[in-house]
Image: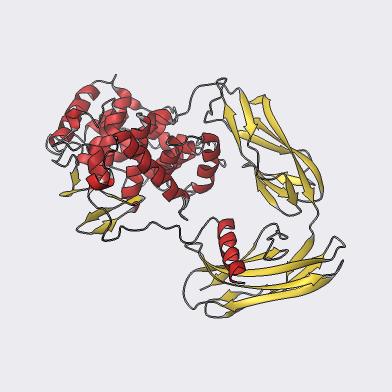
Amino acid sequence: MKRKIMSLVIILSMILGFIPGLQPKAYAADEPTVLEDVYEDKTDEEKIAEAIEALRDYYLNSDKDFTFRVALSYHFTSDNLENDLAIIGQRFKVNENPDSASAYVGNIMGLMAAGKDPRNYNGQNYVKTLAESQNKEGKFIIGQRDDHPTTIAFSMLALDMAKADYDVEKAVNALLSYWDEKTGFGGVDDTAMCIMALGNHKDITGVEAAITKGIAYLKANQKASGGFEAWGEENPCSISAVIQSLIALGEDPLSEEWTKNGNTMLDALLAYKVDDYFENPSQWGTETVMATEQAFCALADLYRGKSMFHEIVMKDVEPHEVRIQQPPYTTIKENGKLKLRANVYNPDGEIILGHSLLWESSDPAVAEIDSEGLVTAKSAGKVTITVTVEGHDSIKDTIELTVEPEEFKVTRIDTGKIKNGSEARLEFNIRENMEQTRSATLIVALYDKNTNKMINYAFATKEYQPGESTNLGAGFLVPETGNHIIKCFVWEDLENQNVILANPIDIDVEK
């Protein structure tokens, strides 16, 4: 029985995208903490590849959504982009209510990293809105805190990636107006980001000189460790910003020119690595989220030897082919759902971005499909799903799906509200539809809504005669505090885990 329970915990966790125990661990006291001990006899390439592998696993196994930085880095370090675009598309969540230029930048870059078109996403054109936010001074102002040099810099980077029309010269001059001989564009981080954006527009008067002064400023502020500081403290974020900037400008951040006392920027950055993530200790405490994200970006650029902001772009290439990725199954139960994904390719077989897709079902009565490729099975039968590249009617692909009747009909009986601190007693009517003798197991599981961790569960099993309809119930006590959700599953049994209910029934718990 113990083995069954552990199996249940693991499988339910996998269904919901979380596996307990896969959390970053800190170094034990007796483990190596000196950089030379950790990376002894390894080349820079090996160090970078090892760190990239750890970071990809770290984010893949995390229960958190991808930010645009993570999405870009995951895309840029992919060795199987077709597969990884699906992961990024699932994990990156668009900010549906952006209230700043920076939020629009995040949407644009994140969508492009996911292989989607930010000019036409759910009826929104984030590129156009950002471009039109440019004021007469050349700045991009949407929110109260947008009047900042890095906002201009990242707006320019995002619009350049999307091949958008905007007043480049005004934007450049607005950015140049922030230059100060003592502080650069406002410190190491801001200077690195600003000259990176300027690097796309060296043909404009004053840009080359600004880049030269910016690089000189960075070089003058490099520490003996090979790293950089902000607010008086060395940190991984500043190092990462400089690495990305230099690569974008065609410089080698690991060259002798940028080596101090035998220490490269890579050495300095990896000193902040703790197992599979990065820490930024400071007088205000230890920060990990931004430190890890920015380190991932810098290492991704080092891994490819190119800038992600130059490579993940809308390409003016006509589509040649569209292919639906083979889903894990092509048979769906009634009321079940299946997410289909497709990629557009150029004549060389490379995935290209920026093309919208149109999805169509041959028989919506059997299965419907929405604009994002989500299939909802309606009734038993066969259906052909077609995807077409918008504006290119001849470029299409198809897949045939089979919808099978529900083996059991599952209906919740008591739809009353469940609150924290109360007993959750859930009862369902389950009817056998296939005129067969079958068993059914109702599983009721309580999850932490923030972490997706399973807190508790209960189950009940019954053998059903052909056509039999009866009620099954299970429950537990809900903790008094916390943010909870209940998920109800129906399997044939705990041993074989044959899914009967195609989609779990979600029940919110009131605080």
Q: Residue at x 56, y 40 (%)?
A: 123
Nearest to the observer: residue 258 or residue 378: 258
Q: Residue at x 56, y 57 (%)?
A: 14
- Please indicate, yes or no, whether residue 353 appears anywhere in the rendered image: yes
Q: Residue at x 80, y 43 (%)?
A: 382
Callout count: 0
Q: Is residue 488 positioned above or below 97 on the image?
A: below
Q: Using residue 150 as the reference point, say whether residue 502 is left or right of it.
A: right
Q: Quadrant of residue 133?
A: top left
Query: Which quadrant, please, contains the N terminus?
Result: bottom right
Q: Residue furthest front?
A: 41
Point out residue 327 in the picture as x, y percentages from the top left corner.
Answer: 65, 42
Q: Quadrant of residue 267?
A: top left
Q: Is residue 368 positioned above or below 12 on the image?
A: above
Q: Residue at x 31, y 36 (%)?
A: 152
Point out residue 249 in the picture as x, y percentages from the top left corner.
Answer: 28, 27
Point out residue 366 in the picture as x, y percentages from the top left corner.
Answer: 79, 46
Nearest to the observer: residue 390 or residue 55: 55
Q: Is residue 295 positioned above or below 490 on the image?
A: above
Q: Is residue 13 positioned above or below 108 on the image?
A: below
Q: Using residue 47 as the reference point, say whether residue 260 is left or right of it.
A: left
Q: Quadrant of residue 285?
A: bottom left
Nearest to the observer: residue 409 or residue 395: 409
- Please indicate, yes or no, whether residue 186 appears anywhere in the rendered image: no
Point out residue 230 in the picture as x, y percentages from the top left corner.
Answer: 19, 46
